[in-house]
Structure formats: structure tokens, C-alpha cells
Image (cartoon, rainbow, N blue to C red):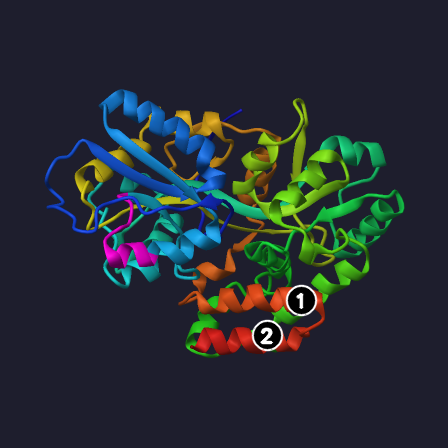
Amino acid sequence: MKLRYIAVATGVAVAGLSLSACSASEPTSPTEPTDALTIATTSNNQGPMEAVVEAYKEKTGLDINLTVADTSQFQTTIRTQLSSGTAPDVFTVWAGGGNPGAIDVLQGAGYLADLSDRDWVSDVDPGTAETLQIDGKTYGLPSKLDAVGTIYNKATLDELGLEIPTTYSELLSYCGDVASAGKVAFALGIQTDWVTQLVPYALVAATVYADDPDFDEQLTDGSATFAGSGWGDAFDKYLEMDEAGCFNADPLGTDVTASYELVNSGEAVGVVQVLASYPQIASTAAEGTEFGFFPLPGDDSGEPSIARGIGVSFAVNEGAKNKVNGLDFVDWLATPEATSIWFDAAPGIPALVTTEVELDDVMQTAADVIAAGRTAPMPDQGWPNAKAQSALFIGSQQLFSGQAGSDDVLRSMDEAFAG
């Protein structure tokens, strides 16, 4: 079907390869025309970005250098590159302030170009637009929305003859039934640090935000803490799922790519992931493999919600050598021509309300859940700095290694949040 999608809020971090410095350390005047452009993104965006870059090269004749990076490396490297004058002209950013590559963090040092006067700004849904703004000024172009849920192999589920769980109680029984059949319910690759956040993010949609949608604001004003909140319930359920056999053996020794391979091979039914990772999962599957999507239930309400936000956004380097070209490229990314190329290369839910795309089963199911209002914020986008997310990564790995309990992780997150 054709969908004109009205966007909602916030975003989360995702996966990749390796990053290199791209532009000169001493930028020339940002208004000086050049015939070059440097762009950097994460590898889950590699396919669609290569497609739009190729089209733009043909359109403009520019010499374009595209690099891709593992998300963790990207997020920790981009600020260093910006401060040293070696950053690319256009690069992926995240909404809010919860990771090192987020808009609030980078623009806090004045590194991002103000995009408020671009024609496409009025096409961004107000709920989404606010997460890309500081003091009413826009610093990122959103491409698509994201959500955390279960991406699953339809053939594997059909083979087992099981139903999708819609309550947490059903989820635990489902895990046992899948394990009894010699398979894994949810592939988990927490050797890759950013993957550690995904199951908790899915669970807190029920354990935190269902009853307290303003929890992040309360964290910020000091009226709430992670300790003593529904985050503790989420961590307890994370461990309970592990004890129930929901995950593969040795998730700490499994990286994100290996978790995808478990799903594609049929050894695992599904994986709790961001929608942004779906094209990467599908691209490595056998031809004809069909995938579906379902929310990970965190309670017994029977109407599970999903954490949702912005999956891909792009900013322009304020000090870029090729700033004019960078602004032109970002403007072009918002056009029907570019969005058609992007979404033909990788399925997704558009973040601009004027964009119409064909949705496959995975994206349509997620879009239906969002349209029904069964959503919660992507937690880190409401956090004031990247420290709490880092504490979550480390603490989750310590949970699975037995080095820490839920209370220890919550305390470390509170300390990091306050810092």
C-alpha cells in the first residue's frame, strides 16, 4: 500500500564498519563553491546511502567520498573529528542528547549548521521536529522513523507452529516451546555493546512509560531515579528471559552480525532489534526469506507497545570546507526523487509527512502499532548526556557475566545521569 506517514518522536543508536577522516583540517570559507563532498554514515545505512550518492554524483558531477562506520566508533570519533577540523561535510546524527553523536551533544560545541531556513523543515511532523531542535532551531534532516521490536523469520515460526506472544507470560512460555524444539526464540549478540540496550528499551515501554510517559522529564528535574523505578522490573525480566531459555547460549560471546546469522539460518526465530537494522538482516538472508515484526511484550496487558523514534538523520558540518555542497545535498535528500531512491534501496517508515512509500510486512506492522498509539519514547533521547547510556551498556554486560545485579546497574546509571 501507499502510506503518507505522520511522524512521531525520538531515536536510538545502530550498527556498522570503519570510519576515516574526510575533510581538510583548515576549512575554507563555507560559502566558497567546491566540486567535492564528503559524507559519513553507519553501515546499516550503507546500501541506501550508496544509492543516493551515486544518483547525486550523476546529477551534479561532484566528487563524493562516502565512508561508513561501526556505530560505537562513529559516535566516539565524530566529535574528535569535528574539533580537529577533519570531520566530513555531511554525517549521520541522532536526535536528542543520549549518545556522543546526538544533536544536543554536538551542537553544544557549535559544530552543526543551522538548517531552520530549509524548505523541508515544514514537512517534519512537530513531534519529530522537536527532537532535532535546540532553542527552536533545526540541526538535522530526519529520513526515517525507527522502533525496537522483534524481527523474525516467518518460515522458522511456521515450522514450529507457534503463535506470536502478546503478553509477557505468553512470552516466557513461547521461549520454552522454542527451546524444546531445539531453536532459539531471540538471538542476542551483546558482545556488540549497543545491542545491550535493545531488550531493556523494548521492556520499559511497558514497565516504565506505560504508566509514566513523562519519566525522562522527571529524571531530568530530579524527581525520579532509575533505581526504584520500572527500569528495575525491566532488568529483572531481561534476566528472567535468559533463565527461561529465550536467548542463545553465550550472548556475551555473540556479536550483532552473528545474531543476524542465527535468524537467517533458521537457528533462531527472531532478534530484538531496531527497524534500521532490518535491511542489513534481510540483505544477508537467502533469497525469498520472508520476515515479520512483533512488539516484545513487557506486561500482560495483551496490547504490547514499542519504543519508537528517528532512525536516520543527517547534519551539515558548520565548519565544512564543502558546506554549500553539504547543504544542497541535504536539501536534495528531502526531495521525492531522493526519498524514492532511498526507500527503494532499504525499506523504512518515512519521517517527512509528505513522503509516500510502499511498506513491506515488517514496516507495515510497525507502522500499524505506531498509528494505534501503542508507543513509548526511545529512552536515551530524553537524557541530557551520553553517560547514562554508556553505563547501561557496561551494566547490561555485567548482568550477563554475573559481575553485577540489577540494583548495581541502576545505581551506575543514576550516577552517570547526574554526572
Residue 88 sits inside the magenta stretch? yes
User: Of residues 169 and 324, which is closer to you in this image?
Assistant: 324
Where is residue 359 drawn, in percent x and y? 54, 29
Q: Residue at x 57, y 34 (%)?
A: 364
Residue drawn at (48%, 79%) of the image = 223
Q: Is residue 334 magenta?
A: no
The residue singled out by tag 1 in the image is 235
The answer to whether residue 320 of the structure is visible from this angle is yes
Circle 2: is it few (<14), some (14-19), or many (20+) Cα within 10 Å?
Answer: many
Q: Position of residue 340 (x, y in %)?
A: 40, 25
Relative to 382, 174 lies left or right: right
Is residue 62 placed above or below 7 in the rendered structure?
Answer: above
In the displayed structure, 128 sits above or below 51; it is: below
Callouts 2 and 1 close, C-beta under 8 Å: yes
Horizontal and vertical percent position of residue 110 = 23, 59
Can you name the residue that lies furthest to the right here?
Answer: 180
Q: Which mark is residue 81?
A: none
Question: Which residue occupies 54% across, 47% down?
Answer: 147
Q: Which residue is mark 2?
A: 410
Which segment did they paint magenta?
79-89
What distance separates the C-alpha of mark 2 from that of mark 1? 9 Å
- In this view of the protein, which residue sits in the foreground, 24 or 340? 24
- Tell me residue 368's x, y (percent): 58, 39
Image point (16%, 51%), residue name: 26
Q: Earlier in the sequence, mark 2 or mark 1?
A: 1
Residue type at the position of mark 1: Phe
Position of 285 compared to 240: left or right? left
The N terminus is located in which quarter?
top right
Q: Point out the image quarter for the C terminus.
A: bottom left
Q: Amino acid at mark 2?
A: Leu
Categorize mark 1 by other alpha carbons within 10 Å: few (<14), some (14-19), many (20+): many
